[in-house]
Amino acid sequence: MLLIASANGSVGMAAGWTILRAGGSALDAVEAAARMVEANPDDHSVGFGGYPNLEGEVELDASIMDGATRRAGAVGAVCGYRHPITIARGVMERLPHVMVVGRGAERLASELGMERENLLTPESEASWREGRDGELPSSDSRRRLLDRVSSLFTDPEHVAGTVNFLAIDGAGHLASAVSTSGWAWKYPGRLGDSPVIGAGNYCDDRYGAAACTGWGELAIRGATAHTVVGGLAAGLPLELAAERAMNELRGLDVPGGEPIMQLVALDSAGHHLGLSSQPGNSYVAWEEGQDNYATLPRRLVPITGQ
Ligand code: GLY
């Protein structure tokens, strides 16, 4: 058994591990773990209390994948429900679809019995107002606001969050879950990599799983999570498969600032790692025989330059 996550997933590790230790499925474990982060108002990159979009609305994206069947469910631009990971699971298990966005996803949430609520906390609203410089969205000020948003691309606190969970259960099955509120001040309706299967999330029992945090636009353009698992399928060891996926992002043009990409990955034998394009970052891992999770360094793999 194994459960790994981005560092902000630490608040969900106990919930996920309790399920795995009791003989539960990897799918149940990653969903339960992600829900803990979605409910954490102090995490402004996921769920309740997430930073809102340009218009001040918290819009959430999430996806979940079952490595045994390669079935997947994803939702995007969901407003008013704190647990998009559970709606994503509803897409996977209740609909003949993979991805449902906006009003459709909110309708499904309601049909699944979830309660609508305001996800904006005073703290995330204050940060949003600060970024807007207090401007109102008249057509004139909106142009200035878009310029201001471009200048905020360099701030990792506002553009690089998201939570990843990858698990292997006692039966050897894999599952992955990713949830995010996306970039602060994002253009309404913008989807990142988190709900895009193959970009921010991919999982296959035969080979392994990978998930991303950072600039979603890069992971979409590089099909980063699938590139890792595709490398494993081609016979590369985990280190090389993951490094190759990061290297594929080198040289992609970006709108400004230093591009950020981080990934966590594991192979079906239970090896795991975290990589980051920036120094000093970590991920968390809980392995069989341990009585708590460990915080481990991510290896630095720069993605700037040729
Ligand atoms: N990586 C999350 C996002 O870009 O929305």
Image (cartoon, rainbow, N blue to C red):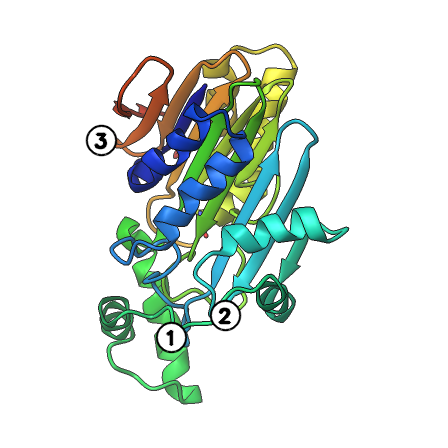
Residue 159 screen position, x and y as percent: 35, 53
Query: Mark 1 or mark 2, which has the lower sequence index?
Result: 1
Q: Is mark 1 within 8 Å of ligand 1?
A: no
Identify whether 113 is placed above or below 173.
Answer: below
Disc 2 designates what residue?
188
Kind of residue at badge 3: Gly
Query: Mark 1 or mark 3, which has the lower sequence index?
Result: 1
Identify whether 234 is placed above or below 37.
Answer: above
Provide the secondary structure element on which disc 3 rests. loop
Binning the other alpha carbons within 10 Å of mark 2 as few (below 14), some (14 to 19) or many (20 upward) gives some
In this orientation, which residue lies closer to the viewer: 14 or 184? 14
Disc 1 designates what residue?
56
Disc 3 designates what residue?
280
Binning the other alpha carbons within 10 Å of mark 3 as few (below 14), some (14 to 19) or many (20 upward) gives few
Kind of residue at badge 2: Pro
Provide the secondary structure element on which disc 2 rests. loop
- Nearest to the eye among marks 1 and 3: give it: 1
